[in-house]
Image (cartoon, grey):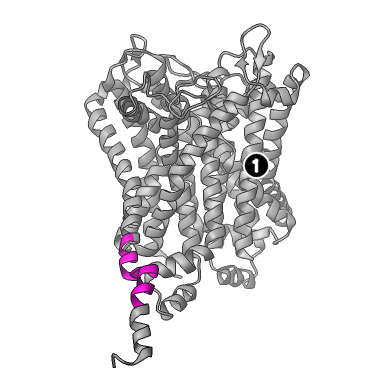
Amino acid sequence: MRKFKEFIIEKLILLCGLASIFFVVLIFLFLLKEGLAVFKTVAPLKFIFGKSWYPISDPPQLGILPLILGSLLVTLGAALISIPIGVACAVYIAEVAPQKIKEVLKSGIELLAAIPSVVLGFIGMVTLVPWVKSIFHLPTGLTALSGSVMLAFMAMPTIVSIAEDALYSVPKSYKEGALALGATHWQAIHRVILPAASSGIMAAVMLGIGRVIGETMAVMMITGNAAVMPNSILQPVRTLTATIAAEMGEAVVGSEHYFALFAIGIVLFVISFIVNVGADLFLHNKKQ
Amino acid sequence: MKDNPVSDCTVSAVPKLRKRARDPVLMQKVAFALLFLATLLIIVPVGLIIVVIVQKGLPGISWQFLTDIPRQGMRSGGIFPAILGTVYLVGGAIIFALPIGLLSAIYLSEYARGNFLTRLIKLAIVNLAGVPSVVYGLFGLALFVTFFKFGASILSGALTLGIMILPIIITASLEALESVPHSFREASRSLGASKWQTIRYVVLPNSISGIITGTILGLGRAAGETAPILFTVAAFYLPQLPGSIFDQVMALPYHLYVISTQVPNVDEKIRYGTALVLLTMVLFMNLAAVVIRCRFRRKKKW
């Protein structure tokens, strides 16, 4: 009897072990199920490279290029800000900071990671947006730039914590060897430890950027949501994620608009899949 | 000495070399100062954000604000339905995600061999963690709301959030299970205990605090997310309490979004107050997780 009970439990454990694979596949299948229907009316290339997004005009124009460029612009800005600062912070925490300060800094970073994106979006709206407006003398502060700055903050905890892990896992003997050869601490960091940790840092950067591309609420609240082709970082833009979040509420179930939003979901899923598998390969490489 | 050509040569070469390589000690000072500056650029805004929300939100908090329903189109009154809605959603998510996540972690730590399947599962976990939150919303809409016909309801929202926090729970539990020394398992097996008995009576009790920590972190994440509940449960304005799991509810993060972007002329005190309540809930859970982790580390004997 006990053997039978354990048999059941072990099967249950195996089943749950496979749950993650099951859910990833399930998510992809349901996105496909609802999203592929849009390609009956719009050619895939026209969907991705179409320059106008007017989903509720008649006939609807469903080109997501402005949204892709919006996402790219905001992401690029966020990457330019967050990568140097994030990696530098990781180096400071891993190598330079005294033990006590290190713990404080790490909890500060964890704190930032814990703040909900809607709260960061709200703070961005009431502080950052007016600043951007008055500094650049713009009609509105809801711009790609504001979004980039805010998103940089959301990417930093990911970048810092994973890069710090990578730096920490570089064998101590590397550093000792460099110091023994007469290098200063900084030379050891810059010439030995950073190159040794480079694949982990690369993974950190990729995951940070993945976080930025997928971020929804803060972006929707502070980038201004104008679905037009962006040509300046000081203009309102709209990202892929914000489009789904803002329009799904009004889209009629079964309409082309509804299918198109799911198709955007497929695009986002594929992007995040590539980013995560890529980052995983970098991390896996390091272990070998 | 001055006539010695060798010494002459070195004397003239040193300043040149210095100029090219610069002073390494000075370089280090500059570099460390820059690193410190970068760290400040992250830490100071975090501090400011917290201070601003607490300072401006505290005057808006009162017993009435926490326990009353929203009134006059959310421009006055309280946020009780939103708080309660978030509690229901988070509770539902954890009821769904904890058993599956824990069993999944047990599989990975105790049963899985280091083969291709294990690698695939780990990759799936990483991917699940990286799927954008709004895509979870779409998925919940397609599967729970439309396909299973649960409608926009607590059930749909909680299940969507549950799947979203699954990777957090699996990763944290796995780490806790793997930190139990191998000798514990061997001792138990050598006493004649079966594999499951070893897990149940030796491995789990020794890793429980890590599992709880991960669960609480998952709770915090579920409480703060907005995008997954946008189309699966969240009600724009619903000044009544839900009667069953098939009802819609208001939720704190969505409420904050609504009153800060969709409804004009909401008193600043209400906006900051709502942000403060949400932030307090999330940070409190994170703090609890940290405290449990620290206390456990101190108690750990191996």
Q: Residue furthest right?
A: A40
Using a 10 Å C-alpha cutoff, classify the residue at mark 1 as few (fewer than 14 neighbours), some (14 to 19) or many (20 or more). Answer: many
Given residues A114 and A95, the one toward you in this image is A95
Q: Is residue A89 left or right of residue B193?
A: left
Q: Is residue B143 left or right of residue A155?
A: right
Given residues B99 and A84, the one toward you in this image is A84
Q: Residue furthest top?
A: A58
Q: Quadrant of residue A103?
A: bottom left
Q: Position of residue B126 (x, y in %)?
A: 60, 47
Q: What quarter of the picture does the C terminus of chain A occupy?
A: bottom right
The answer for which chain carries disc 1 is: A
Q: Residue at x 35, y 16 (%)?
A: B69
Q: Quadrant of residue B80?
A: top left
Q: Residue at x 37, y 24 (%)?
A: A141
Q: What quarter of the picture does the N terminus of chain A occupy?
A: bottom right
Q: Position of residue B45 (x, y in %)?
A: 31, 41
Q: Quadrant of residue A186?
A: bottom left
The dominant secondary structure in magenta is: helix
Can I make out residue A218 in this image?
A: yes
Can I make out residue B291 in this image?
A: no
Q: Position of residue A163 (x, y in %)?
A: 48, 56
Question: Dot 1 lies on which element?
Answer: helix
Given residues B77 and A54, the one toward you in this image is A54
The residue wearing badge 1 is: A273
Q: Is residue A2 left or right of residue A119?
A: right
Q: Position of residue A3 (x, y in %)?
A: 73, 57
Given residues A93 and A141, the one toward you in this image is A141
Q: Residue furthest front?
A: B3
Indicate the amino acid at tag 1: Phe
Asked if residue B29 is among those painted magenta in the image, a careful observer would answer yes
Residues rendered magenta in the picture:
B14-30
Query: Eyeballing the image, is A147 above or below A18?
Result: above
